[in-house]
Amino acid sequence: MSIIEELLEKHHEKFIQSITHPLTNELCKGTLADYRLFTYLTQDLKFFQIGLNLFGKVLAYCDDSKAAITLGKQIGFISNDENDYFFKCLEQLKDESLHELQNKVSQMLLEQPITLPEVQKYNELLTELTYESKSYVELITYMYTMEKVYLGWADYSIDNKLIPANITYKHKEWIRLHSGDDFSNWVAFLKSEVDRVVKSPEDREISERVFVRALDHEIAFFNACYNYDEQ
């Protein structure tokens, strides 16, 4: 059994919690309230710059040339497709549901939107990994865990036929970006990298520690965005 298989089995309940959250379930059903989607995307965007910096750190620490090429290509994808979706969808939500947003999440409409406490804590983890970590094991395990959660909630909804045929762009595109062969292959690559570099008992401890921390932060992030309401 690989280290990733062990971690997913040992922390199965926590992982399932991370991929079956009401926020992502409702997003995939097309029923997530616009103010909740707006909050989620606004807060997720706060990870974007530090996330790119972290991606660069992972690439810099990679000791395999083929793996480094795969990592480099993914940076380009994130910088284009995901970045475009954020701004297009946020503008669409403001056009369609401005009154709702003003009533329920007005602080998210500011030029500098507030940062939810749970998001700040998650950003602190990303900052720690980006500027303090010297462990490729830790960095690649974090990246795998984060992406596995996103593939997980998309696959969960697809497998359970939660996604209606007439789902709109604001929901459909976010699902598309985190499902399908390309994204599945990306997550499989990250798993193979973790399995490749985790060798010693110390490596396993480092990998498990960041795996659990990442899951905890993902769950807290979903909770915070789903529950935020100024009314």
Image (cartoon, grey):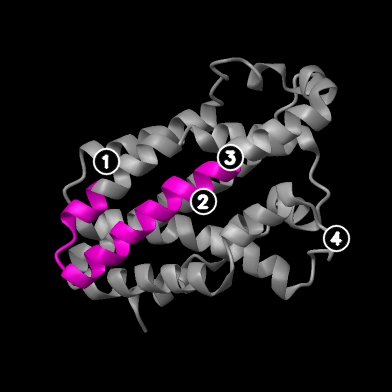
Identify the residue position indicated by label 2 in the image: 81
| Distance between the alpha carbons at the discs numbered 1 and 4 | 40 Å
> Earlier along the polypeptide chain: callout 1 or callout 4?
1
Q: Is residue 154 left or right of residue 9?
A: right
Local secondary structure at mark 4: loop
Main secondary structure along the magenta-highlighted residues = helix
Q: Which residues are magenta?
A: 57-85
Local secondary structure at mark 2: helix
Q: Amino acid at mark 4?
A: Asn
Local secondary structure at mark 3: helix
| Label 2–label 4 contact, CB within 8 A | no
Q: Determine which quarter of the picture holds residue 7.
A: bottom left
Label 4: how many residues lie within 10 Å, few (<14), some (14-19) or many (20+)?
Answer: few
Q: Determine which quarter of the picture holds residue 143.
A: bottom left
Residue 166, which numbered label? 4
| Distance between the alpha carbons at the discs numbered 3 and 2 | 9 Å
Q: Position of residue 144 (x, y in %)?
A: 40, 61
| Label 3–label 2 contact, CB within 8 A | no
Residue toward you, 109 or 230: 109
Q: Position of residue 69 (x, y in %)?
A: 25, 65
| Label 3–label 4 contact, CB within 8 A | no
| Distance between the alpha carbons at the discs numbered 2 and 4 | 22 Å
Q: Residue at x 71, y 17 (%)?
A: 106
Identify the residue position indicated by label 3 in the image: 86
